[in-house]
Amino acid sequence: MASNAAFAEVASLAGDPGRAGMLHALMDGRALTATELAHVAGITPQTASGHLARLSAGGLVTVQQQGRHRYHRLASPAVARMLESIMQVAAGSAPRRKAFVGPRDLALRAARTCYDHLAGHLGVALADALVANGQIELTSDAGIVTDKGAALFDRLGIELDGNLDKKGSGKRKGRMLCRPCLDWSERRPHLAGHVGGALCRHCFTAGWIKHVDGTRAVTVTPKGQRNFREIFRIEGV
Amino acid sequence: MASNAAFAEVASLAGDPGRAGMLHALMDGRALTATELAHVAGITPQTASGHLARLSAGGLVTVQQQGRHRYHRLASPAVARMLESIMQVAAGSAPRRKAFVGPRDLALRAARTCYDHLAGHLGVALADALVANGQIELTSDAGIVTDKGAALFDRLGIELDGNLDKKGSGKRKGRMLCRPCLDWSERRPHLAGHVGGALCRHCFTAGWIKHVDGTRAVTVTPKGQRNFREIFRIEGV
DNA sequence: TCGAAGGTTCGGCCTTCACCGTAACATTCC
DNA sequence: GGAATGTTACGGTGAAGGCCGAACCTTCGA
């Protein structure tokens, strides 16, 4: 079966520790150079270059030349979702080695971006708060923004029209659908999809959160603390 | 980072052609023996046994002893979703080799089970029909069963209460949420999650479809042809 | 125009692992 | 009890591929 070979090829590409580290680093949705990726993966630039060429040929990342720099990014949201789903399985099957969790890992568990939306303790707390306030209904399969929730997003100036089908089948009246995403560190769903992405972008542009160094981890600014408390009733994130 | 090693481990397990073939065969949700899996993967039983032991240690499959048989199945729906997402990326990045597609592959594209729900041309046609008839609303992120759709499922005797949150937060009134799943062969969404699973089970128990040999592929019975036409207005599946 | 830095390619070393043949063990059926 | 089936254990072989050192190519800045 031809599709089987392609399947093994893709999975194998993600299955090398070096490449896995680079893909992990690219999960924040930004574009990075081979040298940067080599640094985070703990390998030499020439090795990283070979890996990236292979990832590019396999369709997992795309390259964008800019002067003497070559920026690599994940090829599509589908790739990001694949990486997320592998993380879920890996987190679930991990023999819970009580091993040392460094400060780096702790920061990731507290709050991070997951391609285009928020994850970690903050992401789950946000989803919980929206559910508790009756602004979103969630199951493990899907979620829906209630009228109350739509009013909130409208008040925040978050545009959700992007949630419509690509076919542009006119205005979808009241129903804003959103995708839940099981958090690998919290084992609980957080908000993904168009709604989760829009909410995450708003948090950045409003100055509520910001990236730590150049990693996926994010920290909540004092302004963000205040707003998360007042708007979402989230304490101490 | 410890989670990174676990990630690479899981992806690597899925990245071997032999193991990929066996996982692919297990995607229909049934439990198979090492010898059967060896046959579909085209390797000897002793090689398959080694692979299965590794997959089991990695938490991708679980084993169930029954007499002199050891039945292997996917460890969790999360594993099935991971395999699906890898297939999506593999199908998207595959250089569309116009290569020979055998009758086996054609049968899979026509209709197959995808762990617990229907996929392939039939799965997509069903989802399209439900949308066209106003029984379900779908975006790429999520789906919702309308009142009209709830009435249909009720009429068919399909119980959807399983769609509630595990927390058992009382009866969810009108909103049945369902999960879309991008079909790797059709590149369009079909119905997954609790709703898709319930619908698929009903198709089997009602005798509308049945498995081909012992594969994931399914065929539509004459009775199914009639019902799909009369109930869903699907022609010629 | 020339030097420096980022990035890629080449060659060689090395480890890992998939695979099978043979053989031993466990369970079921006759 | 003995044959048949299904599964696991062990040793050897071969190929795939990860890794780095060094050389080469390209771009930027002086």
Image (cartoon, coloured by chain):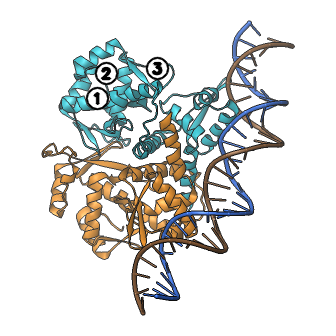
Chain colours: A orange, B cyan, C blue, D brown
| Between discs 3 and 1, the one toward the N terminus | 1
Label 1 to label 2: alpha-carbon separation: 8 Å
Amino acid type of the residue that numbered disc 1 sits on in the rendered structure:
Ala
Q: Report the side of A145 relative to B83 (left or right).
A: left
Label 3 resides on the chain identified as B
Amino acid type of the residue that numbered disc 2 sits on in the rendered structure:
Val
Secondary element at tag 1: helix
Tell me the tag on residue B212: 3
Query: In the displayed structure, would residue D5 be above or below residue A161?
Result: above
Label 3 to label 1: alpha-carbon separation: 20 Å
Query: In the displayed structure, would residue B214 be above or below residue B85?
Result: above
Provide the residue designation for mark 1. Answer: B125
| Between discs 1 and 2, the one toward the N terminus | 1
Report if the CB atoms under discs 1 and 2 are less than 8 Å apart. yes
Question: Local crowd at mark 2 within 10 Å, few (<14), some, or many (≥20)?
Answer: some
Residue at 29 percent of width and 28 percent of height: B126
Secondary element at tag 3: loop
